[in-house]
Amino acid sequence: MPQGSAPRQIIYEYIKSNTKDGRLPEGFDIPWLEDVWAPGAQDGVALQHMVPIGSTRDPERDEKILKGLKLMASENNAAHVDEVFAVFGELDKKDSIVRLFDPIVRTIASRREELDLMALLDFGDFLICNGTSLLAVKLGLNVLAPFSVPFVEEVAMEFGVYDEFTYYAARILGNRQWPNGNAELFDLAKNVRGWGRIHAVEWLVPATQEIRDWLLFEGADNTVIPQYSADICLQKAEAEKRLEGQLTEKEYYAIENLIRESLTPGGPCPGVTDGDRLLPKFIEKAAVFPPDTGVIRMILDSAAEYGLDQSTIETAKKLAGR
């Protein structure tokens, strides 16, 4: 059946009915949505390749957000559903709803005296429980994010198994208001492989050795482009600290792989954070473990960018056979 031709269903129920052991089947999609993007891809591109707007102030945009929230929180809010979608549909076309996560949460927090918070919570619940469109569910998750009520944590986990919604789940679970949120986000990260893993890795706190090890060995293993997460995984897995200690062969080659991904030209990654410190330590260990000469050459090509000293450069040249 062509995408978009299937009868509409409630997205929440469709995802729950297809989830088994915390994950969706490989290749899962929502067939009635007319969208040429892979799940989570459009939001991912907006977040990774557009100028962030989370901390910027835009009076016109923020007033439209407040208008939409007031309609949700009004006494007769059920009569304003179409108006709500008109307001946020316009904002979505201009800025993409995923980029409005922070402005919406900030507006709820800063204008709470002007909003009936219980009515707003109920409207967010209505959107996620009855939504048949991506905008409805994303808007609902966005609105629910500031509320410390148990069902918000629960629905974050239920929706987060689908790459299209993992970002919203990660933002909710990454909030320190949930004692088990980071552990739950770790479970989500392991159970998604596309854009969802990229988002989960970005917001996951490396609070335990288990998480740090997973980030090193599997965090960048996504079906999109591993480079999106490679540098983040180097940082969160404490690659520099590992290089200073008793490094295992498995750790060395995992770090090597992440450096390769991070330094690959033409990709989305900015490079290696703190490469001026990490790369010399890697070169030092490369004399112990047989290195991939291709990676060593990539480091040499970046020597000036990271200010590598002459001793490190000479060692790298020998390793690369130059």
Image (tube, rainbow, N blue to C red):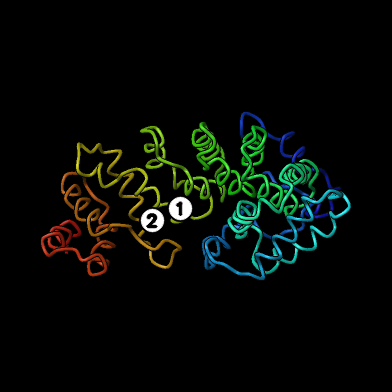
Q: CA distance from mark 1 to mark 2?
A: 7 Å
Q: Which mark is residue 261?
A: 2
Location of residue 207 (image quadrant): top left
Judge from the rendering whether residue 213 lies leftward or rightward of residue 200; answer left or right: left
Answer with mark 1 or mark 2, whichever residue precedes in sequence. Answer: 1
Q: Nearer the viewer, residue 28 or 231?
A: 231
Q: Tag 1, which secondary structure?
A: loop
Viewer-closest of 188 and 247: 188
**Numbered label tally:** 2
Residue at the image point whose x is 33% and y is 54% from the top: 259
Residue 170: percent from left, percent from top: 55, 44
Residue occupying the far top of the picture: 21
Which residue ends up furthest to the right in the rendered image?
79
**Quarter of the image with the C terminus in it:** bottom left
Relative to 285, say whether 25 is above or below.
above
- The residue carrying pointer 1 sits among few (fewer than 14), some (14 to 19) or many (20 or more) residues within 10 Å by Cα, namely many
Q: Considering only vertical position in the picture, is 167 above or below 153?
A: below
Give the farthest residue toward the front. 113
Q: Secondary structure at mark 2?
A: helix
Residue at the image point whose x is 52% and y is 68% from the top: 51
Q: Are marks 1 and 2 in contact (CB under 8 Å)?
A: yes
Label 2 neighbour load within 10 Å: few <14, some 14-19, many 20+: many
Residue at 83%, 60% in the rendered image:
83
Asked where in the image residue 205 lies, by quadrant, the reply is: top left
Q: Amino acid at mark 2?
A: Glu
- Residue assigned mark 1: 226
